[in-house]
Amino acid sequence: MNLIDGIGGVFLFSNDTKRLAAWYRDCLGIEAAGQDSECNSVYATFDSRDIENPEITRTMAWAIMSTDQDIKDKPRTGQINYRVKNMKEVLHHLKSKGAAIEKTQEYPGCGNFAWVRDPDGNKIELWEPAEGA
């Protein structure tokens, strides 16, 4: 049974959406495409082609949404994996912005990985696929 055919969106929650959106813009280059003033959220979209039918374009939403609960300094679970083109360049840029790289690891045949946290404590995994992966 194939009930899921993709990911429609990734949603982060924050008490300060503008600050967190600025960090993602400055450190990872994710530029918010819009802002919803009604719920104080910012969002970006990523498009891809369907493998089986390349004429179909799929859009994935990425958003930082406001929460009315105080989540400052609360533990976070899960992580988002971002595919990168050049790990060395991304890590150099993150360090120049003051981000602490928690760990890096190379997995032959799979690629290079690095882990960092955003200012709200959300865990981020960066992945540079190996050639042909």
Image (cartoon, rainbow, N blue to C red):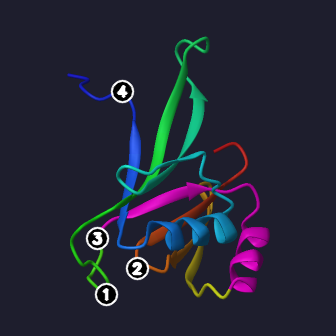
Task: Give percent across and percent down for residue 5.
Answer: 36, 27
Task: Give percent across and percent down for residue 121.
Answer: 40, 79
Q: CA distance from mark 2 to mark 1?
A: 7 Å
- Local crowd size for mark 2, using a 10 Å CA cut-off: few (<14), some (14–19), many (≥20): some
Mark 4 / mark 2, whichever is N-terminal: 4
Q: CA distance from mark 4 to mark 1?
A: 35 Å
The residue pinned by badge 2 equals: 121
Magenta includes 92? yes
Magenta includes 80? yes
The residue pinned by badge 3 equals: 77
Observer-side mark, 4 or 2, equals: 2
Q: CA distance from mark 2 to mark 3?
A: 9 Å
Residue 39 horizontal side relative to residue 22, left or right: left
**Which segment is the magenta one?**
78-97
- Local crowd size for mark 4, using a 10 Å CA cut-off: few (<14), some (14–19), many (≥20): few
Mark 2 vs 1: CB contact within 8 A? yes
Mark 2 / mark 1, whichever is N-terminal: 1
Q: Is residue 11 above or below residue 100?
A: above
Residue at 55%, 12% in the rendered image: 53
Residue at 35%, 73% in the rendered image: 15
Q: CA distance from mark 4 to mark 2?
A: 29 Å
Q: Find numbered disc 2 in the image and state the secondary structure of the residue it sits on.
A: loop
Q: Is residue 80 above or below residue 63?
A: below
> Camera-side residue: 66 or 95?
66
**Tag 2: amino acid:** Gly
Residue 5 image label:
4
Residue 89 horizontal side relative to residue 36, left or right: right
Residue 73 image label:
1
Task: Give percent across and percent down for residue 45.
Answer: 55, 40
Mark 3 vs 1: CB contact within 8 A? no
